[in-house]
Amino acid sequence: MWESFKTLVRALWAPLPEIPGERNDRQLSPELIRTIREIQVKTNHLVNHMMAGEYVSAFKGKGMEFREVREYEPGDDIRLIEWNVTARMGHPYIKEFREERELTLMLMVDVSASGRFGSTDKMKNEVAAEVASILAYAAIKNNDKVGLIIFSDRIEHFIVPQKGRSHIWNLIRTILSFKPEGRETNITLPLEYLLRVQKRKCVAFLISDFQARDYATALRLARQKHDLVAIEISDPRESVLPAAGLVHLEDAETGKTVIINTHDRALTLKYQRMKERDSHERKRWMRSLGIDTIRIRTDGSPINPIVQYFKMREKRH
């Protein structure tokens, strides 16, 4: 563990090599370029050292494809006997198959105004970019394609599923630098868009703070076609308010404001319980639709909840 930590520290502080795709992004600020590069270095390290095999075990391929026939050996499944070859050769042969491993991973990332909030050293949209990078690296490391749908209260941008390290640069850059036209969140839109652009079954991660309403039907329809997982990004200050007296709270998406007396303990507890109830209720009805939920906070590790989910999914399957 200590050696892995030292390796990560050296990687983050060493001069960073140019990454494929960066040459075309000289219009970006040096700060943003460094942020993207650090996310790439960090998530690549985390995937290699903490997620080795977890992604492959959690998400199976599209099926089995025939590879070859070979002579039967004691213990082989007799249901796999290739009778035509067996008849020609005079002794039993069996069919061998291999898993058709290649998958398509679709990332649906919320870039609405509420993502530009964070009470720690990271904003929610930065955590979303890290999460997307972790998933993209895990997929591309296993030769899977990765696509991206960016949304707010409209479909903001779509990147066709592709492979390659430079493709990850493009995904992270797009998520962090994209300036959305919309401010609010409409989760129905990316789910409907996914059904239109992705005809074959894929693994789809919906990354959002879920500050939206009336999207259960769209979730149900998308889940019927694709392997859908929800990732909820939250910040501790969204549910636990500090004792700071009268505080103006503004909804980043609608612009509406309200004044709350944070010294009123009963009021702040009621607010906290309401936010926790909303989150638990959302997780409950998503589970009823067959959709798993991963909760990630801006003040916590982005990878540990993902690894835990992959391990849980492997055991369940």
Image (tube, helix red, strand yellow):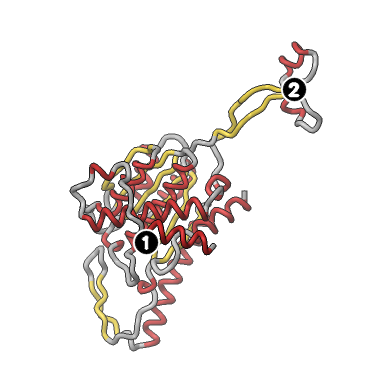
Residue 162 found in image quarter: top left
- The residue indicated by pointer 2 is 71
- Give the residue drawn at x 39%, y 62%: 233
Residue situated furthest left in the rendering: 27
Of residue 310 and residue 223, the one placed in the foreground of this image is 310
Amino acid identity at mark 1: Asp
What is the CA distance from the residue labelled 2 to the residue labelled 1?
55 Å
Please, what secondary structure does the residue beneath circle 1 have? loop
Amino acid identity at mark 2: Glu
Please, what secondary structure does the residue beneath circle 2 have? strand
Residue situated furthest top in the rendering: 88
Are the residues flagged by discs 2 and 1 in contact, CB closer than 8 Å? Answer: no
Residue 29 spot, x, y in % from top left? 20, 55
Against 161, is 46 above or below?
below
- Give the residue drawn at x 54%, y 50%: 52
Of residue 253 and residue 102, the one placed in the foreground of this image is 102
Of residue 242 and residue 279, the one placed in the foreground of this image is 242
Residue 43 spot, x, y in % from top left? 42, 54
N-terminal of the two: label 2 or label 1? 2
In the rendered view, does 137 fall on the left or right side of 63? left
- The residue indicated by pointer 1 is 209
Is residue 213 something that shows in the picture? no
Residue 281 spot, x, y in % from top left? 47, 65
Residue 267 found in image quarter: bottom left
